[in-house]
Each structure stands twice: as structure tokens, then as C-alpha cells.
Amino acid sequence: DVKVTQSSRYLVKRTGEKVFLECVQDMDHENMFWYRQDPGLGLRLIYFSYDVKMKEKGDIPEGYSVSREKKERFSLILESASTNQTSMYLCASSFPGHWGQPQHFGDGTRLSIL
Amino acid sequence: TQLLEQSPQFLSIQEGENLTVYCNSSSVFSSLQWYRQEPGEGPVLLVTVVTGGEVKKLKRLTFQFGDARKDSSLHITAAQTGDTGLYLCAGHSDNYGQNFVFGPGTRLSVLP
């Protein structure tokens, strides 16, 4: 079974802090994604990566950055956390595919910014 | 404005009842996926539909892709408490590369 592991289930940080969310997958997937999930808004794509050292902005990249130094690890960085970044963050991975491959999700990190 | 709309937003039913939830868009998709997300967990893929008019069955769950590939439905027969969760649809088109756009979800509660 594919396993996508997110480093923390719950995280509480203060406004202005630099926050790191880590995600590791064990299925040698090329593609990795970071989403945030808010009630009534569904999953919104923050950043994605199709290969090591490659990153692309999703729909809501402002205030975030990412790092992919190794194929299995994709990190999301909140440069200076703000209260409007309080949310559930989901990491996903998949194989590449022309018409979209199934995404395998981690269990999420619920982040609170105080 | 959501690219994918899902209805109803919330649904609470008794065990044994049937239900249908909907996923609609004005855009055409090359494929559409349905996920279920249980509390405290990430979404898990239920099915992918790729052909207009396609019907797929997964035990008591029946998924249909609209003929025009703009909408989809999920029908559950004789719901069980284990069906409780958030049902998300996700659409893919060539415009998105290898990405999907997700709907806001239907939160289903099946009561014993």
C-alpha cells in the first residue's frame, strides 16, 4: 500500500513564525502536491512538483514556498505565518499520467496560527 | 466561484436509506474522480470515470459520469453508518496538466 506520511497531525504556531510541514511518500511517485482544505471550499492546490528540484505554483501560492530536494520528500514552508493560514494541510502523491492519476493523500496536518 | 459544485452540502439520513449526491460543472472534464474522506484522515480514492455516460459500481455505490462529461453522480443503496464521511469529486482536463480541481464536498452522516 502507498503510504504518504505527514510529519505532524496537529501544530500550533504564532504569527510571524516560519513553519515547516514535511511530507514523505514511499511509492517512488514522481508527482507530489500540497493542498489546504477549508470548510465549504474543498481542496485548493498550493504548490506541486513533478520531479526532484522542480516546483510549480498552484492556485493559492501566496505566503508559501516549497522544497523538493529528494524524490520522496516534499516540504511546505510558511515564510511568515499569519492567522489566515490556519487550516488543514494535505499532502498527496501520484504517478505521472496524461489524464490524471489517482492521488494518494496523507492524513493531514491541522495547523493553527495564533 | 467554484469550478466544481457539489450538492447537497450536507446530508443526514437513517441507516438503510438510499441517497444520491451530485457533482456539477460548466466545464468538460477528461476524467472525474470520487474520494471519501473520513474524520481525521486524508481522502481515499473510490473510483475514476473517464467516458461520457460511464457507470461504475463499487458494492452499494454507483457512480455515473454525465454524457457531456460535465457532471457526475454518486448513488448509495441501503446506506450504512460506515458510509459516513465527506465525499469529494475531482475533475481533470488537459488544461490542468496532471492536476485536478476539487469540489467542496458533500458531508454525509448516516445515523443508526
Image (cartoon, rainbow, N blue to C red):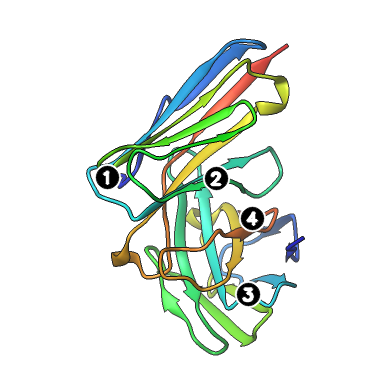
Q: Residue B37 is drawn in which quadrant?
A: top right
**Label 4 lies in what chain?**
A
Res. A81 in view:
no
Q: Which mark is residue B47?
A: 2
Label 2: how many residues lie within 10 Å, few (<14), some (14-19) or many (20+)?
Answer: some
Report the amino acid beneath label 2.
Answer: Val
In three-dimensional space, the C-alpha distance between marks 2 and 1, rounded to whole angstroms, equals 26 Å
Nearest the eye: B49 or B102: B49
Give whichever of discs 3 and 4 has the lower sequence position.
3
Question: Residue B69: horizontal and vertical position, in percent?
Answer: 30, 45
Between marks 1 and 3 in the image, the one whose residue lies nearer the viewer: 3
Taking the image as shown, residue B8 lies to the left or right of residue A27, namely left
Between marks 3 and 4 in the image, the one whose residue lies nearer the viewer: 3
Report the amino acid beneath label 4.
Answer: Leu
Taking the image as shown, residue B1 lies to the left or right of residue B92, namely left
In three-dimensional space, the C-alpha distance between marks 3 and 4, rounded to whole angstroms, equals 26 Å
Q: Are marks 1 and 4 in contact (CB under 8 Å)?
A: no
Taking the image as shown, residue A74 lies to the left or right of residue B100, namely right
**Label 3 lies in what chain?**
A
At 53% from the left and 72% from the top, the residue drawn is A80
Q: Which mark is residue A29?
A: 3
Q: Which residue is mark 1?
A: B1
Between marks 3 and 2 in the image, the one whose residue lies nearer the viewer: 2
Nearest the eye: A65 or A51: A51
**Label 1 lies in what chain?**
B
Please tell me whether residue A11 is drawn above or below residue B111 in the rendered image. below
Q: Which residue is mark 4?
A: A111
Please tell me whether residue B17 is drawn above or below residue B53 in the rendered image. above
